[in-house]
Image: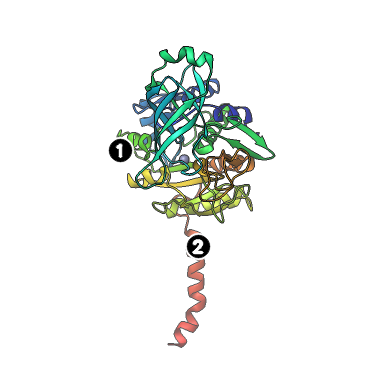
C-alpha cells in the first residue's frame, strides 16, 4: 500500500495546540468522509474511527468474538500556547500548555491563528518558566508589524488565539526526513486514518475488522481526551477482550534510532505495558518487519497506553523515533535556534519516512486474524519443558 504523503503533509500543516485541535479535526473528518470510513465525535470531542455512532461503537464492543478489538489511539494536539490578553496592540500575553524548550527562547518565531481565517506570526519577547523549570509557563508575543494584521486586530479576541513555534514551513522534506512543527502526534493520527482508509477500501471486507481508532484531544496536558473517553463508561459492557495500542512519536533514545524502523514500545516513563499483548506484538513485528523494527521501553515520556493501563485495560504501544522531541533541539539540524544538546532552544521535530510507513505496516500486522492472543507463550512453554526434560539426569545426579 503506497504512503499517502499528500494527506500526511496536509495534516502536518494544520495548526494545533492542546484544547485547540479543531483544524486537525476538520482535515481528518474530511479524509474519513471521502474514504467512506464511519466515524463520529464522542462528547469530549475525540474522533472515533470505525464506528458511525455511539450505538455502533457499543455494538462492536459488546459483540461476542474471539478476536480482541484493537483500539488504536493517537492524539491530535501538540504543545503550544493560548492567548490570554493584549498587553498592547502588538503584544499578546499567552499561557503555555505542555512541554517546551527552556533555552534560547528570546526572540524565537511563533505562529498564531484564531482557528479560522486569521493567521499571523510573532516573536517571543518575554517569558517565564514553570516552577520546576521544565517548560514555559507564560510568555509575551510581539506580533510582526503588518498593516493588515494591525487593522484587523480589534476584531480578534486574545482568548481566541493560539499558536506555537514557527519554522521555515509547517512541513518540509530533506531526503527521507520529514521536518515539521508538530510530528508529535499528528504522525500517529495519520497512521490511524491511513490504516482505516486501507481497511475500508477493501469492499468485501468493509467494516469487518476488529478495529477502532480513537483520536484524542489534549494529551500533552495529561491525557485529558483519553481519560474523558475512558470515563464515558462505554467499555464497561465489553464481551470481548480489548487491546489498546498507543501510536506515538517518542523522544529518540539509544536503541530507538531515527530511520531504523518503528519501535515495539514495551513501556513508557510511567509503566511497562501488558506482557501477553507485547509477546503477540513482538512476534508480529518479527514477521512483518524482520530486521527493520526496534524494541524497547521508551521512557523519554509517557503515552496514552499508560492512561488505558490505569483504567484496567490491556495496552501497548508503537513509537516512531522523534528528533527534537517537543521542539527541544536535542538533535539540532535545519532551522534549530541553537547548537544541538540538552540545553538547546526551539527546533522543528523530525521523523523518518520509512519509520512512518513501518508503523502502518505494524498496525496492519496487528489486525491479522488468528494471532495467538489467547496463549502467546505456548511455544516458549514447550521449549522450557523440553529444557527441563533434558536437565533431569543432571538434576538427579546432585546436589
Ligand atoms: Zn505525543
Task: Give 270 or 152, whichever is nearer the viewer.
Answer: 152
Hey, which quadrant is residue 172 in on the image? top right
146 vs 156, left or right, is right
Identify the residue at horizontal 47%, vertical 50% (top origin): 300
User: Circle 1 sits in a helix, a strand or a loop, which is it?
Assistant: loop
Task: Please identify the residue farthest to the bottom as the structure is shown.
Answer: 398
Q: Position of residue 254 (x, y in %)?
A: 56, 56
Q: Quick check: can you spot residue 1?
A: no
Q: Position of residue 154 (x, y in %)?
A: 41, 13
Q: Which mark is residue 236?
A: 1
Residue 349's place in the image compared with 150, above or below, is: below
Residue 26's place in the image compared with 216, above or below, is: above
Between the C-alphas of marks 1 and 2, the distance is 33 Å
Identify the residue at horizontal 49%, vertical 83% (top origin): 393
Q: Position of residue 184 (x, y in %)?
A: 50, 38
Identify the residue at horizontal 55%, vertical 48% (top origin): 330
**Rendered-image quadrant of the C terminus:** bottom left
Q: Is mark 1 within 8 Å of ligand 1?
A: no
| Mark 2 lies on residue | 380
Q: Is mark 2 within 8 Å of ligand 1?
A: no
Task: Give 243 or 11, whichever is nearer the viewer.
Answer: 11
User: Circle 2 sits in a helix, a strand or a loop, which is it?
Assistant: helix
Q: Quick check: can you spot residue 352?
A: yes
10 Å neighbourhood of mark 2: few (<14), some, or many (≥20)?
A: few
Amino acid at each position: 500500500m503506497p504512503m499517502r504523503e499528500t494527506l500526511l503533509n496536509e495534516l502536518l500543516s494544520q495548526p494545533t495546540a492542546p484544547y485547540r485541535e479543531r483544524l486537525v479535526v476538520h482535515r481528518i473528518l474530511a479524509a474519513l468522509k471521502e474514504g467512506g470510513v464511519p466515524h463520529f465525535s464522542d462528547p469530549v470531542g475525540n474522533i472515533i474511527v470505525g464506528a458511525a455512532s455511539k450505538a455502533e461503537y457499543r455494538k462492536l464492543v459488546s459483540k461476542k468474538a474471539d478476536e480482541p478489538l484493537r483500539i488504536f489511539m493517537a492524539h491530535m494536539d501538540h504543545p503550544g500556547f493560548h492567548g490570554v490578553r493584549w498587553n498592547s496592540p502588538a503584544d499578546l500575553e499567552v499561557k503555555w500548555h505542555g512541554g517546551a524548550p527552556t533555552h534560547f527562547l528570546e526572540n524565537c518565531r511563533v505562529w498564531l491563528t484564531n482557528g479560522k481565517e486569521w493567521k499571523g506570526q510573532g516573536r517571543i519577547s518575554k517569558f517565564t518558566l514553570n516552577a520546576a523549570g521544565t517548560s514555559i509557563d507564560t510568555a509575551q508575543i510581539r506580533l510582526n508589524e503588518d498593516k493588515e494584521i494591525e487593522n484587523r486586530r480589534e476584531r480578534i479576541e486574545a482568548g481566541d488565539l493560539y499558536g506555537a513555534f514557527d519554522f521555515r514551513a509547517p512541513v518540509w522534506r530533506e531526503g527521507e526526513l520529514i521536518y515539521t512543527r508538530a510530528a508529535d502526534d499528528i504522525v500517529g493520527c495519520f497512521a490511524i486514518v491511513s490504516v482505516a482508509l486501507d481497511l475500508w477500501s477493501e469492499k468485501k471486507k468493509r467494516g469487518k475488522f476488529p478495529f477502532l481508532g480513537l483520536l484524542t484531544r489534549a494529551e500533552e496536558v495529561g491525557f485529558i481526551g483519553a481519560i474523558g473517553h475512558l470515563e464515558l463508561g462505554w467499555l464497561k459492557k465489553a464481551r470481548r477482550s480489548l487491546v489498546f495500542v498507543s501510536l506515538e512519536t517518542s523522544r529518540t533514545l539509544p536503541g530507538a534510532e531515527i530511520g531504523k524502523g518503528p519501535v515495539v514500545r514495551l513501556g513508557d516513563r510511567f509503566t511497562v505495558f501488558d506482557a501477553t499483548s507485547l509477546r503477540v506484538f513482538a512476534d508480529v513485528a518479527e514477521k512483518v518487519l524482520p530486521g527493520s523494527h526496534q524494541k524497547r521501553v521508551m521512557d523519554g515520556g509517557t503515552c496514552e497506553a499508560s492512561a488505558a493501563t490505569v483504567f484496567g485495560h490491556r495496552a501497548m504501544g508503537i513509537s516512531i523515533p522523534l528528533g527534537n522531541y517537543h521542539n527541544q533541539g536535542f538533535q539540532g539540524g535545519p532551522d534549530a535556534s541553537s547548537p544541538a544538546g540538552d540545553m538547546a532552544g526551539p527546533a522543528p521535530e523530525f521523523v523518518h519516512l520509512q519509520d512512518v510507513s513501518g508503523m502502518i505496516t505494524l498496525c496492519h500486522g496487528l489486525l491479522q486474524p488468528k494471532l495467538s492472543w489467547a496463549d502467546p507463550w505456548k511455544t516458549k512453554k514447550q521449549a522450557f519443558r523440553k529444557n527441563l526434560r533434558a536437565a533431569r539426569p543432571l538434576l538427579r545426579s546432585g546436589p
